[in-house]
Image (cartoon, grey):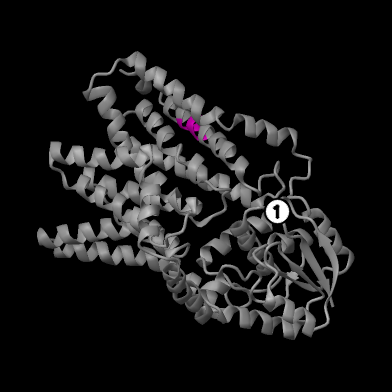
């Protein structure tokens, strides 16, 4: 009788300890988040847009209809929940929850092919990509990772152990819908695996089984999608959702110079140790055991890399969805090293120790620094002065406008944007009509203050200010910028 059989509570204790460990890892990584209570600095551009929309929702406004952005509605719902918990650190709590759950499911995936100790090492190794891709957090990829991990576990358990329940099919469809409602180009997992299962069932003439799979998957997706679409419809935002999330994103994805840029980004996301090991391991395993799962998985990795590279933009957080994608082949690779290739057990413990040190103590300096300076003002130079000027020359019922991409100002001053377009760059360069709509909004609302982000002053804003008799009341230096923050008052 094993120790685990003699003491049934040991397994539960181990799980609790691992859960605590994953929570601590999430805490360490999330030090980078501007929403972290020790940071108090909303400096991540994308995150401040999502938080501004959350603030607007809480004040009775609605995404797409009343404020423009081109991400999926689930992202705004997540931010609204976090903002409602606490305007400063509520979103950070949600980030910690999602990261912890992702690490736990990655560990669960790893255990499909190796023991607990090797699964722990594999989870460490795959998760190190967070150092490269986390990019301040509160981004679509961060929230998508858990849904990718859950579905990946379901698909792999089906291919490896032929285990699939009706409930799992529904969950898999729901996870697909959640990710689709975050950002469309992150659904590579479901495209490849669902297509593979479809082809296999057709080839094996399992038509009844295939029909059941499709029906339950669609049911799961519907359970998530219908309430969101009803929410949008009841608030007269369904058409705007389609225009922003589908049509605008098609334009946005094709607006950058493709070709060389796409190839370059493909190379950037491909050439990490984890991704190289993952693709190579899949190829090696297929030549060894001739199982279709390894070809399918290699195709998934390559297709996923393509979907995040197609925009041709060097946003490193796009690569975050590669983290759960690599855990399965990395686990096989590590299992091969320490079992089939007969590496000494002592070396195993040495490598485990190294992983723990790198994984936990690499950000130790940053973590301790964040704690020691938790009461300090961490906003960029000029931001506090800008907020003081705004608060002195307006009240919370007044609307203001920030020209640029700097929604942080709305959050810090608790002022509402005077236009549906709280930011105008780069969306205005993708669709120039946005600038016309923005200035039409300003003509109607005549905001009390207009704040111009450094480097954004141009003829468009200059003409509007002169035409509507705005005067400059502040010229504030900003960080290392050669241009200052300009504040104009009616």
Q: Position of residue 467 (x, y in %)?
A: 78, 85
Please state, as top left, top right, bottom left or bottom right, where the N terminus lies in the image: top left
Residue extent of the magenta highlight: 15-19
Was residue 18 drawn as part of the magenta stretch in this picture?
A: yes
* Residue 313 visible (yes or no): yes
Please state, as top left, top right, bottom left or bottom right, where the C terminus lies in the image: bottom right
Quarter of the image where one finds residue 122 = top left
Question: Mark 1 sits on what residue?
Answer: 86
* Residue 162 visible (yes or no): no
Quarter of the image where one finds residue 326 = top left
SS at mark 1? loop
Relative to 331, is 190 above or below? below
Viewer-closest of 328 and 464? 464
Judged by its main secondary structure, the magenta piece is helix
For mark 1, does the 10 Å Cα neighbourhood hold few (<14), some (14 to 19), or many (20 or more) residues? Answer: few
Q: Relative to residue 40, is residue 394 drawn left or right? A: right
């Amino acid at each position: 009788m094993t120790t685990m059989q003699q003491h049934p509570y040991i397994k539960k204790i181990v799980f609790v300890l691992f859960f605590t460990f994953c929570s601590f890892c999430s805490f360490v990584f999330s030090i980078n988040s501007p929403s972290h209570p020790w940071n108090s600095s909303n400096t991540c551009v994308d995150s401040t847009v999502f938080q501004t929309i959350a603030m607007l929702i809480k004040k009775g406004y609605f995404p797409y209809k009343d404020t423009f952005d081109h991400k999926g509605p689930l992202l705004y719902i997540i931010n609204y929940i976090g903002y409602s918990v606490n305007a400063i650190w509520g979103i950070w709590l949600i980030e910690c929850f999602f990261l912890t759950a992702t690490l736990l499911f990655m560990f669960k995936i790893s255990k499909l092919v190796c023991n607990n100790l090797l699964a722990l090492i594999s989870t460490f190794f795959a998760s190190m990509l967070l150092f490269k891709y986390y990019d301040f957090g509160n981004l679509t990829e961060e929230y998508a990772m858990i849904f990718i991990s859950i579905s990946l576990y379901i698909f792999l358990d089906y291919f490896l152990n032929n285990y699939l329940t009706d409930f799992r099919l529904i969950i898999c469809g729901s996870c697909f819908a959640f990710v689709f409602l975050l950002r469309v180009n992150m659904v590579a997992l479901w495209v490849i695996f669902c297509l593979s299962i479809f082809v296999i069932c057709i080839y094996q003439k399992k038509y009844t089984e295939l029909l059941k799979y499709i029906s339950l998957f669609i049911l799961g997706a519907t359970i998530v999608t219908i309430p969101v679409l009803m929410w949008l419809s009841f608030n007269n935002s369904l058409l705007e959702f389609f225009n922003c999330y589908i049509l605008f994103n098609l334009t946005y994805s094709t607006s950058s110079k493709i070709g060389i840029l796409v190839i370059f980004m493909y190379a950037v996301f491909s050439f990490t140790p984890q991704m190289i090991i993952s693709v190579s391991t899949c190829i090696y395993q297929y030549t060894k055991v001739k199982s279709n799962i390894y070809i399918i998985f290699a195709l998934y990795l390559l297709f996923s890399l393509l979907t995040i590279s197609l925009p041709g933009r060097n946003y490193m957080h796009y690569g975050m969805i590669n983290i759960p994608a690599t855990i399965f082949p990395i686990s096989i690779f590590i299992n091969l090293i320490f079992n089939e290739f007969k590496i000494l057990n002592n070396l195993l413990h040495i490598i485990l120790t190294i992983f723990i040190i790198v994984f936990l103590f690499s950000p130790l300096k940053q973590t301790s620094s964040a704690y020691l300076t938790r009461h300090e003002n961490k906003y960029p130079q000029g931001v506090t002065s800008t907020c003081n000027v705004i608060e002195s020359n307006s009240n919370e019922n007044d609307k203001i406008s920030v020209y640029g991409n700097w929604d942080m100002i709305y959050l810090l001053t608790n002022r509402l944007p005077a236009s549906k377009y709280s930011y105008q760059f780069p969306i205005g360069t993708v669709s120039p009509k946005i600038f016309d709509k923005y200035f039409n909004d300003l003509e109607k609302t005549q905001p009390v203050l207009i704040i111009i982000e450094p480097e954004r002053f141009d003829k468009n804003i200059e003409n509007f200010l002169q035409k509507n008799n705005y005067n400059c009341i502040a010229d504030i230096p900003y960080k290392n910028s050669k241009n200052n923050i300009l504040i104009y008052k009616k």
